[in-house]
């Protein structure tokens, strides 16, 4: 009894180390890949075959089909990806996850050559661990530390695998264990056991690893391994099914596609393989299975299922649609799906995309509002109000989402993006508010039949062109956090301030000469205030991109240093200011 207890403790410890290593390695790989994961999955999966290749690649990188599938469910729920695009990615993830089994099969290598001895986990794991800890502890760059973490995770995974295998070897002499393995040869029992094990630990790679470690006993036959592997593919769907709870119908359909793919693939295999076995018995089923055999079976099944079902992807979509029918109420997609928080780099990238969309709406609202000062139109005013409302919704959604992201362990690069977004969304929302102020000033002009003089209109046209340009440049720099574009915003903001002061001075002179009324001045003041403050908010956004996001200087300190000539870029600032000032020159006063 004591032996069994000790071996059980060793087995559980090995499993814990195995799962820890897999989780550590997967998260480090994910951090290394960063926000590119979303770009790859969401923007390059235009066709099902292409989606398959991308799903395969991404899953092979992050070592988790469950993570990829949950990510895809989140993309569909957010409207980033269509259901049809998701089908190919899901199929690819099933094949990509088999890479882990091939890595773990190294423990079954046999031979006396130096290369074989090095590749054995007993030698390779210490080598990887030593290299990993050197990179993690002594290298300063985050990339090196991530690579070190990947290697340490790999070492833990392989050591856990060795520990599990060692704790199970005594079972080869146990009659009850041999009988248990024989019972797994029953396809139904084997599939149920494989599905249950994978559903419990929520990782098909881990459950396949456990099966591979059991091969060390010599009691695992092909007849036992095949049904269990089939069940493991079904059991891994549980994670996506759980992840789709509370999502919209297309996201739930995505999880159903994953389930149907594995169930149909399993049924086809059962019918063909065991059906042929009735007429032509498979003699190898009673032979002992090793780690490499498990990897081959796992990969062969998933590739065969994909080859059969990939051309029939429309059938999977139809089955999923029948399982999750359309509701009478129209569902809204989640702008920022919390499922993506499980992959922080992807969540950061998604939040940035929404913030850019918010900035584009704010800039469009201001452009439309400025047009209203020349010719008011109630329909256009409604568009301005609608765009301002959308920026409010974006700000609310981003605020909540970014706070949640701030509580997650992020890379330095992702932290900078997070800080930039946190500091800038309120500035962007205020630009939309000022657009509404411009629209209301235009409405007042129409209601009171206020018409500026030709001279004033010409001056406002120059100012509005400068405001439109600074908004466009700010949005462009915000889209890619382009420092070169951001550096051009501040001198343009200074020009807008100078233009506003000049318009006020000219208005006062016209007022003094009796060429303008005080009533006109009130409307003009509203317009100038909105334009000047919009440019100020653009400056705030650009400064965040340039300095605060990198933790160098506080915004006001940076601006003061820039204008006083203390910074290296001060000369470029002065040159640009002079150029923009000439570009937005007012017509001579008559």
Image (cartoon, helix red, strand yellow):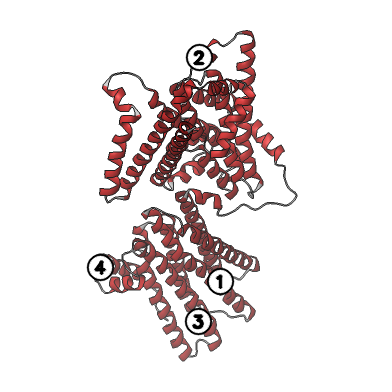
Instruction: Reply above or below: 348 against 276.
Output: below
Q: Mark 4 or mark 2: name the one nearer the start of the chain.
A: 2
Residue beneath label 1, please?
Answer: 374
Q: Could you say which quadrant of the image residue 544 lies in?
A: bottom left
Q: CA distance from mark 3 to mark 4?
A: 34 Å
Q: Nearer the viewer, mark 3 or mark 1?
A: 3
Q: Nearer the viewer, residue 431 or 207?
A: 207
Residue beneath label 2, please?
Answer: 287
Query: Residue at point 65% right, 53% down?
Result: 332
Q: Mark 3 or mark 1: name the one nearer the start of the chain.
A: 1
Q: Mark 1 or mark 2: name the one nearer the start of the chain.
A: 2
| Horizontal side of residue 200 vs 113, given as left or right | right
Q: Which mark is residue 525?
A: 3
Residue beneath label 4, please?
Answer: 567
* Callout 3 crowding tier (Cα within 10 Å): few <14, some 14–19, many ≥20: some
Q: Nearer the viewer, mark 1 or mark 4?
A: 4
* Callout 2 crowding tier (Cα within 10 Å): few <14, some 14–19, many ≥20: some
Across and down, in percent, residue 589 comes to 41, 80
Across and down, in percent, residue 228 comes to 56, 26
Point out the image quarter for the C terminus: bottom left
């Amino acid at each position: 009894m004591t032996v069994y207890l000790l071996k059980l403790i060793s087995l559980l410890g090995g499993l814990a180390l195995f799962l820890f290593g897999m989780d550590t390695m997967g998260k480090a790989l994910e951090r290394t890949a960063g926000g590119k994961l979303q770009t790859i999955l969401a923007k390059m999966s235009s066709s099902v075959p292409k989606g398959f290749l991308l799903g395969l690649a991404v899953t092979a990188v992050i070592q988790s089909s469950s993570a990829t599938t949950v990510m895809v469910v989140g993309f569909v729920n957010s409207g980033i990806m269509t259901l049809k695009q998701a089908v190919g990615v899901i199929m690819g993830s099933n094949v990509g996850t088999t890479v882990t089994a091939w890595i773990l099969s190294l423990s079954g290598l046999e031979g006396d050559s130096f290369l074989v001895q090095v590749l054995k986990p007993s030698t390779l794991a210490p080598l990887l661990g030593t290299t990993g800890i050197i990179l993690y502890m002594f290298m300063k760059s985050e990339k090196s530390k991530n690579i070190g973490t990947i290697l340490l995770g790999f070492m833990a995974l392989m050591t856990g695998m060795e520990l599990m295998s060692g704790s199970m070897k005594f079972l080869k002499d146990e009659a009850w264990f041999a009988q248990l393995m024989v019972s797994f040869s029953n396809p139904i029992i084997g599939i149920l056991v494989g599905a249950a094990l994978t559903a419990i630990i929520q990782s098909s790679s881990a459950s396949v690893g456990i099966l591979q470690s059991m091969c060390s006993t010599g009691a695992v036959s092909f007849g036992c391994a095949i049904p269990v592997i089939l069940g493991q593919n079904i059991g891994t769907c549980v994670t996506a099914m759980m992840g789709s709870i509370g999502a919209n119908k297309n996201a739930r359909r995505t999880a159903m596609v994953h389930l149907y793919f594995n169930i149909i693939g399993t049924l086809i295999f059962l019918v063909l393989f065991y059906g042929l076995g009735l007429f032509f018995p498979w003699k190898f089923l009673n032979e002992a299975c090793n780690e490499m055999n498990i990897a081959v079976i796992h990969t062969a099944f998933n590739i065969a299922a994909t080859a059969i079902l990939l051309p029939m992807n429309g059938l999977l979509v139809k089955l999923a649609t029948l399982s999750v029918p359309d509701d009478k109420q129209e569902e809204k997609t989640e702008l920022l799906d919390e499922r993506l928080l499980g992959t922080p780099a992807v969540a950061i990238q998604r939040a940035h995309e929404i913030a850019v969309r918010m900035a584009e709406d704010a800039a469009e609202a201001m452009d439309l509002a400025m047009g209203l000062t020349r010719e008011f139109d109630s329909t256009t005013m409604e568009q301005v109000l609608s765009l301002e409302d959308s920026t409010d919704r974006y700000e609310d959604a981003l605020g909540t989402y970014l706070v949640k992201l701030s509580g997650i362990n992020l890379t330095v690069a992702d932290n900078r993006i997070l800080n930039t977004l946190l500091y800038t969304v309120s500035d962007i929302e205020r630009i939309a508010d000022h657009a509404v102020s411009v629209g209301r000033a235009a409405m007042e002009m129409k209601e009171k039949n206020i018409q500026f003089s030709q001279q004033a209109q010409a001056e406002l046209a120059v100012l509005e062109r400068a405001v439109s340009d600074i908004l466009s440049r700010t949005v462009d720099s915000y889209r890619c956090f382009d420092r070169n574009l951001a550096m051009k915003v501040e001198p343009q903001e200074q020009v807008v301030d100078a233009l506003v002061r000049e318009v006020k001075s000219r208005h006062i002179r016209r007022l003094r000469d009796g060429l303008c009324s005080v009533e006109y001045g009130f409307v003009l003041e509203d317009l100038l205030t909105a334009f000047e403050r919009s440019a100020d908010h653009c400056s705030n956004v650009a400064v965040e991109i340039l300095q605060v996001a990198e933790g160098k200087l506080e915004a006001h300190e940076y601006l003061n240093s820039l204008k006083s000539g203390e910074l290296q870029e001060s000369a470029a600032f002065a040159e640009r200011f002079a150029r923009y000032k000439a570009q937005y020159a007012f017509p001579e006063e008559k």
